[in-house]
Image: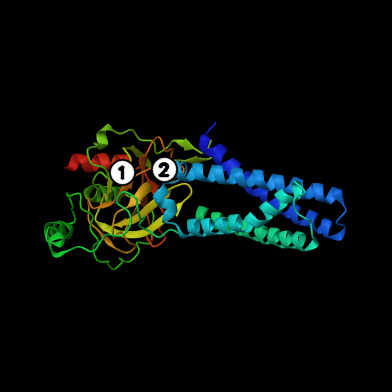
Amino acid sequence: MDTRLILAWLHLLALGVGLAAVWGRARALRGTLRDPDDHGALRRVFAADAWWGVAAATWIVTGLWRLFASTEKSLGWYFGNRAFLLKMALFLAIIALEVWPMMTLMRWRRNRDLRTPGNAGRIEVISYVQCALVMAVVLAASGMARGYGSTGGVPGEPGGGTSPPASDSAQAPAAPAARAARRGDVSSGDSLALPAVPPIEPTGVETVTAADLALLASEVAMPLDGIEASSLRSNYDEARGGGTREHRALDIMAPRGTPVRSVAKGRVLKLFTSVAGGLMVYAADSSERFILMYAHLDGYAPGLREGAALARGQVIGTVGSTGNASPSAPHLHFAIARSADVTAWSKGMPIDPLPVLQAAGRRR
């Protein structure tokens, strides 16, 4: 069975069990307040506390495993996501609140501390607060799954984060790259933060014509260096998700950290994060008829932002395995769609990228 599936299942199961246990501990403590001599209520307190401890330990172990083994997303992605940082802050608050109840209940078990209604009442209140915090953790995790909290560039990632201020000497070599950008082609490994460009009027149609394909083939180039389109096999029509959906893209295998280049001159439409695609870039070509999507990135290029102009060949990120890609098989998920309006960046008529890239290769 998939390790990622098992870890995700255990992590979510621990959240559910932990919430039930800490709630049960609070309710059992209410029973001891009503009757301090009710040993049945005390046993329920200890049982619920034990389950809470097991759930918390499972939660911590699976969470750290998923984080540092990058089973779902890269470490840099997590620490560049505000929803994850909120989730961690809530988790630390839960742990901090647990210190005194844990020590007090341990003394109760060993009969080393007098069980007073005051102590029982305080642990009950703390338990209810922890219930609320656990539910807030679930909300933060749901936000992460929906793509909330992403800051765009990911600090600490290859090619991610914010570029340091450049000195005069560092800016001097940029002139050739800027001239290349104006021509619509960048062959160097430097990424560019080009000025924003005004959008073109929407075409209003999604129909793919022979003229569209010819235009696209004249504009695009391979997104990864050292790979010929003629050597690739199309996986556009492959069934995914147990046959529930079609792939509608081209997977190009490459080592993690390989630069991903913009295949065409155009502009950035959206920097997006999703459970399936991980770190993603949606871009428009120069005619603004086509949406070009790059997914499973390990990080964004420095300075990349929504609305910025792109030159063909400009580095926009690096190959990775974020999202639902296997960590052992980093690759670029590249898709093309004919769009009636590129501002609706997640919609459009899918086009098999491989024939387009092969046609572009034959033109050069």
Identify the residue shown where x is 26% and y is 37%.
229
Residue type, label 1: Gly
Q: Which mark is residue 248?
A: 2
Element class at badge 1: loop
Q: In this view, does 81 lie above or below 246?
A: below
Q: In this view, does 223 lie above or below 228?
A: below
Residue type, label 2: Arg
Number of the front mark, 1 or 2: 1
Residue 334, picture quadrant: top left
Q: Which mark is residue 257?
A: 1
Element class at badge 2: loop
Distance from disc 1 to disc 2, alpha carbons, whole Å, reads 24 Å
Identify the residue shown where x is 44% and y is 46%.
73
Image position, residue 234 (x, y; %)? 35, 35
From the viewer's perspective, tell me whether residue 215 is left or right of residue 322.
left
Few, some or many residues within 10 Å of mark 2 (<14, 14–19, 20+): many
Image position, residue 311 (x, y; %)? 22, 56
Q: Note whether residue 221 is visible.
A: yes
Q: Nearer the viewer, residue 360 or 257?
A: 257
